[in-house]
Image (spheres, grey):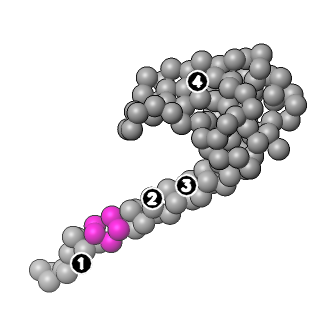
Amino acid sequence: MIKLRLKRFGKKREASFRLVACNSTSRRDGRPLQELGFYNPRTKETRLDTEALRLRLSQGAQPTDAVRSLLEKGGLIEKTVRPAEVVGKAKQAEARKVGAKNVAKQAAEAKAEETPTDNTEA
């Protein structure tokens, strides 16, 4: 299977990436089938060979998650919501709801402890 992935190059701690098409079993920095673009995460510079990318995608090449986000930003593929994102957002919403309930419960308990229920003056 052909994968569209990022190939690292550049100095230590100053990485830049080439967007390449390569066999899924090859190494990350191995020899690619074709170079399709460039991405510099420090300056956010992105250059894409749109014609070659469209050709590879039409042939069934599968982009990695990082490449997919670059292609979505570049407008080459439509932004899709992956099932993992839906599940993660649902879990985050549930955690927020539980956290808000706990905060409200603690506030009510603190308020109940503040107000004296002792009426000894009567």
| Residue beneath disc 3 | 92
For label 3, the crowd category at 10 Å Cα-Cα, with few meaning under 14, some 14 to 19 and many 20 or more, is few
| Identity of the residue drawn at 86% across and 28% down | 58
86 w.r.t. 10: above or below: below
Q: In the structure shown, which secondary structural element does the residue marked by tag 4 occupy?
A: strand
Q: Indicate which disc, 3 or 4, sits on the residue closer to the N terminus.
A: 4
Residue 101 appears in the rendering: yes
Q: Indicate which disc, 2 or 4, sits on the residue closer to the N terminus.
A: 4
Q: Is 62 or 9 nearer to us in this picture?
A: 9
* Residue type of the residue flagged with mark 2: Ala
- Between marks 3 and 4 in the image, the one whose residue lies nearer the viewer: 4
* Outermost residue toward the bottom in this view: 120
Residue 68 appears in the rendering: no
What's drawn in magenta, residue-wise? 106-111
Say whether residue 30 is magenta.
Answer: no
Label 4 vs label 1: CA separation?
Answer: 70 Å
* Residue type of the residue flagged with mark 4: Phe
Label 1 vs label 3: CA separation?
Answer: 39 Å
Q: Indicate which disc, 2 or 1, sits on the residue closer to the N terminus.
A: 2
Residue 112 position by quadrant = bottom left
Q: x, y percentage for residue 71?
A: 67, 27
